[in-house]
Amino acid sequence: QKEVEQNSGPLSVPEGAIASLNCTYSDRVSQSFFWYRQYSGKSPELIMSIYSNGDKEDGRFTAQLNKASQYVSLLIRDSQPSDSATYLCAVNGNDYKLSFGAGTTVTVRA
Amino acid sequence: EPEVTQTPSHQVTQMGQEVILRCVPISNHLYFYWYRQILGQKVEFLVSFYNNEISEKSEIFDDQFSVERPDGSNFTLKIRSTKLEDSAMYFCASTYGTPNTEAFFGQGTRLTVV
């Protein structure tokens, strides 16, 4: 059973601050890593994908991957109230599915 | 922007009834998936589908579930005899390439079994 664990949260940050989200995974053969944002009652929305070790930046989002430590993170810079949501870490282990973490709920305080 | 569309957005059904959830994946995508999310829980994989056959299915996807691509655009999930515990959000997703590429999700169907 592949496990994906996320810091449980909830995480509350002031507007303009950095939100840091962490995720660890159990399956060493995992190849692809994704961060999804999910607003309450809505579907997961892809915000970042990362496939190789290191950092990947897209606007205010930075994903970091360390396969040796089986760790992937997401930084949200200059957090905005619209970033308030649950962030899901998802991992593909070179098979036909994504394994999701339970999510970390972020609240950005205005 | 291309998107995955699902119908209906909300379905209420009586226990024991059959339901069909419908999805139109992104048009040039090749792999299709169903996931579900019980309220307050993780998103769980149900089944993946490629080239008109199931690629992988989870333990949840038992004999009461089936999937079909009846034509060139639709992808359906059928639950034959619904149970109370089938109440959940059901998400359809698709990927262009292999399953380790980016998956895009539809807006979901909220299934309520009473």
Image: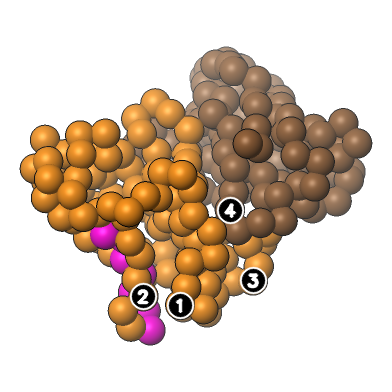
Chain colours: A brown, B orange
Look at the numbered disc 4 and give the secondary structure of its residue. loop
Alpha carbon of mark 2 to alpha carbon of mark 1: how far? Answer: 7 Å
Look at the numbered disc 1 and give the secondary structure of its residue. loop
Look at the numbered disc 2 and give the secondary structure of its residue. loop
The question of residue B77 being in magenta is answered with yes
| Mark closer to the chain start, 2 or 1 | 1
Q: Which residue is mark 1?
A: B52
Where is residue B73 shown, x and y percent of the image? Answer: 37, 79
Alpha carbon of mark 1 to alpha carbon of mark 3: how far? Answer: 15 Å
Q: Are marks 2 and 1 in contact (CB under 8 Å)?
A: yes
The question of residue B26 being in magenta is answered with no
Q: Are marks 2 and 4 in contact (CB under 8 Å)?
A: no
Q: Is residue A84 left or right of residue B72?
A: right
Q: Which residue is mark 2?
A: B69
| Mark closer to the chain start, 1 or 3 | 1
Q: Which residue is mark 4?
A: A97
Amino acid type, label 2: Arg
Give the chain of mark 1.
Answer: B
Quarter of the view holding residue B68: bottom left
Q: Is residue B103 left or right of residue B61?
A: right
Q: Is residue B93 visible?
A: no
Where is residue B28 shown, x and y percent of the image? Answer: 52, 79
Q: Residues within 10 Å of mark 1 (few under 14, many from 20)?
A: few
Give the chain of mark 3.
Answer: B
Residue at 45%, 77% (x, y): give it: B52
In the rendered image, residues at marks 1 and 3 fall on the same chain: yes
Q: Are marks 1 and 3 in contact (CB under 8 Å)?
A: no
- What residue span does the magenta drawing correspond to? B72-78
In the rendered image, residues at marks 1 and 4 fall on the same chain: no
